[in-house]
Image (cartoon, rainbow, N blue to C red):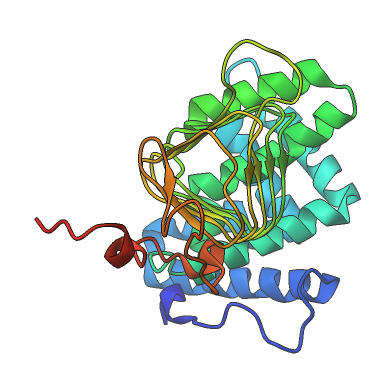
């Protein structure tokens, strides 16, 4: 049975973020890897070295990230020890990893299995590596944090400053070209598409980057600049340029971005777009243009 035939992201009786969920997910990932190795012998050695030979999710992830991000002068063994030490001593980072795996599996119809995400989703891998870089940043190990940021950018084409704070349940979908500035904050259960920029507005220092609330969806190619607040459950349309605050549960579209329904009484939605991944339901209210 191919791993893609698994359709149950998590059994409902296990509390999200618990050790039980982490253990269940790791067991599920190993089962998927075994089935894939049987179905595709060409991948058997690869799946053994990256998943099946490891005793825990953090060991597998640390090994995989170490091999992805190493260079001739930044050795995979050094990176493995670095990642493993931080993941194994910080339960909140492991819980965030589990939440991110679930986010990809549930929200992205192209994600056929947890193991596929763990091994192949560069947005997921970049996010986990960033969590380690951020931990180093908070420990005042800034040269190593910045070196890790540079490797993440080189390998995954995702540039997140190690000072940026990122929640859990994050989906960087496709992820190429994502840029997140030093003082940016991304809440929980946020989905961000490729070529999104959370940037500053110039060379001024201080708190200068966007704050993204829980459950926000940011479409491909959107640019959000300055210390602005994107409210909980808001939606930013693809290609939009946002320079001011966006209220919760509203949709901003265009360049410069405008609120669907108008500034005075913007249309509000009930769903959480960061989880529903609904990019286009606003179109009927936004425009009657037909190609």
- Which residue reaches farthest top? 203
**Residue 269 point in image, percent of width and height:** 51, 70
- Which residue reaches farthest left? 291
Against 129, is 272 above or below? below
**Residue 257 point in image, percent of width and height:** 42, 41
Q: In which quarter of the image is residue 287?
A: bottom left
Against 28, is 186 above or below? above
Against 80, is 24 above or below? below
Q: What residue lies at 58% left-to-right and 17% top-to-bottom? A: 72
- Which residue reaches farthest bottom? 13
Q: Can residue 174 be seen in this view?
A: no
Give the quadrant of the N terminus: bottom left
Q: What residue lies at 69% left-to-right and 87% top-to-bottom? A: 12
Left or right, 14 with reference to 174: right
| Nearer to us in this view, 86 or 157 | 157
| Nearer to us in this view, 129 or 30 | 129
Left or right, 285 with reference to 5: left
Left or right, 146 with reference to 238: right
**Residue 197 point in image, percent of width and height:** 50, 33
Give the quadrant of the C terminus: bottom left
**Residue 246 point in image, percent of width and height:** 57, 48
Against 132, is 270 above or below? below
Left or right, 29 with reference to 285: right
């Amino acid at each position: 049975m191919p791993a893609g035939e698994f359709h149950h992201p998590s059994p409902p009786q296990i509390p999200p973020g618990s050790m039980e969920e982490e253990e269940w997910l790791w067991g599920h990932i190993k089962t998927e890897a075994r089935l894939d190795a049987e179905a595709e012998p060409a991948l058997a050695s690869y799946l053994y070295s990256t998943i099946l030979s490891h005793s825990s999710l953090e060991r597998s992830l640390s090994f995989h990230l170490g091999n992805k991000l190493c260079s001739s002068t930044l050795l995979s063994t050094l990176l493995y020890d670095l990642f493993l030490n931080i993941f194994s001593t910080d339960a909140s980072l492991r819980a965030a990893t589990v939440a991110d795996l679930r986010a990809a599996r549930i929200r992205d119809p192209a994600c056929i299995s947890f193991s596929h995400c763990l091994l192949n989703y560069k947005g997921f891998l970049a996010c986990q590596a960033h969590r380690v870089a951020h931990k180093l940043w908070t420990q005042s190990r800034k040269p190593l944090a910045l070196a890790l940021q540079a490797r993440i950018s080189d390998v995954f084409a995702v540039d997140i400053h190690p000072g940026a704070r990122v929640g859990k349940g994050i989906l960087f979908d496709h992820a190429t070209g994502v840029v997140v500035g030093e003082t940016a904050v991304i809440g929980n259960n946020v989905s961000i598409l490729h070529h999104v920029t959370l940037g500053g507005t110039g060379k001024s220092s201080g708190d200068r980057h966007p704050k993204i609330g829980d459950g926000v969806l940011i479409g491909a190619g959107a640019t959000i600049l300055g210390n602005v607040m994107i409210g909980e459950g808001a939606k930013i349309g693809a290609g939009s340029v946002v320079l001011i605050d966006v209220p919760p549960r509203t949709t901003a579209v265009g360049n410069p971005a405008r609120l669907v329904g108008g500034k005075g009484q913007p249309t509000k939605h009930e769903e959480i777009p960061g989880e529903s991944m609904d990019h286009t339901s606003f179109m009927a209210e936004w425009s009657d243009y037909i190609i």
